[in-house]
Image: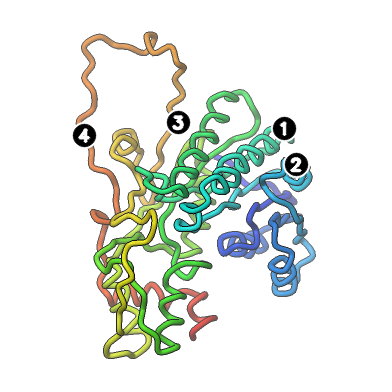
Amino acid sequence: MVKMKKDSVVTITGGTGSFGQTMAKSLLSENVREIRIFSRDETKQELMRNEMRDERLRFFIGDVRDPDSVASAIRGSNYVFHAAALKQVPSCEFFPMQAVATNVTGSSNVIEASVRNSVESVVCLSTDKAVYPINAMGMSKAMMEKVAQSFARGRENSGTRISITRYGNVMMSRGSVIPLFLEQIRSGESVTVTNTEMTRFLMSLDESVDLVKYAFTEGNSGDLFVRKAPASTISTLISALALLTGKDKIEVRDIGIRHGEKQHESLVSSEEMMKAVDCGDYFRIPLDSRSLDYQIYFNQGTKGNDSVEAYTSANTMQLSAKQVAAKIVGLPEFTEMYG
């Protein structure tokens, strides 16, 4: 188990995003000496600086694609939370090499700089779309996971511990569907829906931070962590928003499934579930640390594991409209924007 040291220095890549800001606020309540916010957007950095006004925050402009700017931000850090990514599915479909450059090569740069600078722990953030990926964003995130595990497998004697977290839709996060739907409802527009029977996992920003902290404290190098989460259909989500906004009926406009979208998402594949460790609120999928010499691991007559069902947004607990509404109304982000 790792415990964050007193007076530690923490770097958050993609630190001006929804997760980065929530993690920074959480860390500021702890006894850290410095939090380095690494991102490309100077405007977002200025907004964050003015909002939080804490001298422990330091801001680094750079890009994970640029190894020198990454190394400059990470040098002297004890811990790194890697959240920088291209996350919009349709955009990555049109510009897949940009997704590769940021999500794969950029992640490799972050992990390499962390190892070179003797960072104690790195947590890389992934997504449900990396499981059985059908779109460029999910494929690039799946490759990011493989890069992280490769570093962990190849550097077992390194002082840097590398772990991965994977989660689904984060409610009220920047670019997510709930703020879009609420804005459309407030403006009197039709809600634009791709498919009302799609299911999506639902979790809060605070829960995503808790997952990353759990991986930070509980994981061995190469471990992948998933937080168990409920889900709902898009139709149920719209009914929940109707309850929250006092609308008897919300007009829905079907725009069709967008490029790269799935009907249901998966957080843990069937193959991963066969070796997953149930940790209560979380699943831990340990690293397969075997070498390529499979003969030394072969036991004659040993049977393979029976098939295990994947953990998906279709077979997890399904929330009712009232339950979804209760989750949304309890979010500080909802209160700030629509309270």
Question: Which of labels 2 and 3 is toward the front?
Answer: 2
Identify residue for label 4: 307
Looking at the rendered structure, the secondary structure element under dot 1 is helix
Quarter assignment of residue 104:
top right
Q: Considering depth in this image, is 130 or 125 the residue closer to the camera?
A: 130
Please report contact status of discs 1 and 2: CB closer than 8 Å, yes or no: yes
The image shows residue 338, relative to residue 77, as above or below, that is: below
State how far apart marks 1 and 2 are (Cα).
Answer: 9 Å
Q: Considering depth in this image, is 218 or 131 the residue closer to the camera?
A: 131
Identify residue for label 1: 116
Residue sticking out furthest to the front? 94
User: Which residue type does callout 4 highlight?
Assistant: Ser
Q: Residue at x 41, y 77 (%)?
A: 181
User: Percent from the top left, x then y, of residue 292?
Assistant: 45, 16
State how far apart marks 4 and 1 are (Cα).
Answer: 40 Å
User: Percent from the top left, x then y, of residue 182?
Assistant: 43, 80
Q: Earlier in the sequence, mark 2 or mark 4?
A: 2
Identify residue for label 2: 71
State how far apart marks 1 and 3 are (Cα).
Answer: 22 Å
Q: Residue at x 28, y 79 (%)?
A: 239
User: Which residue type does callout 3 highlight?
Assistant: Leu
Looking at the rendered structure, the secondary structure element under dot 3 is loop
User: Percent from the top left, x then y, of residue 191?
Assistant: 36, 79
User: Which residue type does callout 1 highlight?
Assistant: Arg
Looking at the rendered structure, the secondary structure element under dot 2 is helix
Identify residue for label 3: 287
Q: Quadrant of the N terminus?
A: top right
Quarter assignment of residue 256:
bottom left
Question: Which of labels 1 and 2 is toward the front?
Answer: 2
User: Which residue type does callout 2 highlight?
Assistant: Ala
Relative to 303, 258 lies left or right = right
